[in-house]
Amino acid sequence: MLPKNRQPTHPGEILLEEFLKPFKLSQEQFARHLNGSTQPKISEIINKKRRITEAIALDFADALGTSPEFWLNLQNRYDLWFARQNHEKIPILPELKAMGY
């Protein structure tokens, strides 16, 4: 089991290591297969410079036989991990605490 404080894998790394490399697809080939995408956009995703949006998740899911939720969940886990690194915890509202929350 992975430690809970481990930085999640970026979806671009999953794209590269689990899909492009095993199927010997170049970024250019994959981009051409997607409607309206370009190799620089795919490169930015792989290099953690671009997020997986809902539209990208739909395209990836169609092209790779996955679900859009798969890609969005990877992105959300990655983003949330970074947000938590600098988050100062706020105490629960006293009214809710009094009710046992």
Image (cartoon, rainbow, N blue to C red):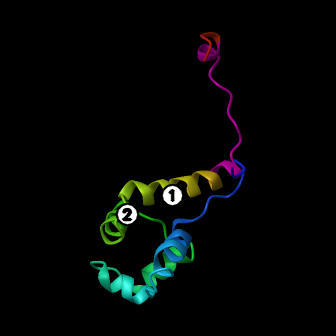
Residue at image mark 2: 57
Q: Return the x and y of residue 87 as percentages of the image width and height.
A: 68, 46
Of the pair 93 and 50, the residue shown nearer to us: 50
In the figure, 70 relative to 44: above or below? Answer: above
> How would you rate the neighbour count of disc 1 (Cα within 10 Å): few for under 14, some for 14-19, many for 20 or more?
some
Q: What amino acid type should be assigned to the residue bearing mark 2? A: Ala
Looking at the image, residue 17 sits to the left or right of residue 60; the answer is right
> How would you rate the neighbour count of disc 2 (Cα within 10 Å): few for under 14, some for 14-19, many for 20 or more?
many
Residue at image mark 1: 74
Which one is earlier in the sequence, the residue at label 2 or at label 1? 2
**CB of mark 2 within 8 Å of CB of mark 1?**
no
> Would residue 55 be counted in the magenta stretch?
no
List the single residue furthest toward the top.
99
State which region is magenta: 83-97
- Which structural element holds mark 2? helix
In the figure, 77 relative to 96: above or below? Answer: below
Q: Return the x and y of residue 44 as percentages of the image width and height.
A: 50, 78
- Which structural element holds mark 1? helix
Looking at the image, residue 37 sits to the left or right of residue 5; the answer is left
Q: Return the x and y of residue 92 as percentages of the image width and height.
A: 64, 25
Q: In which quadrant is the C terminus drawn? A: top right
Q: Residue at x 30, y 67 (%)?
A: 62
Q: Residue at x 44, y 65 (%)?
A: 52
Q: Return the x and y of residue 47 as percentages of the image width and height.
A: 57, 77
Residue 25: mark in rendering: none
Q: CA distance from mark 2 to mark 1?
A: 10 Å
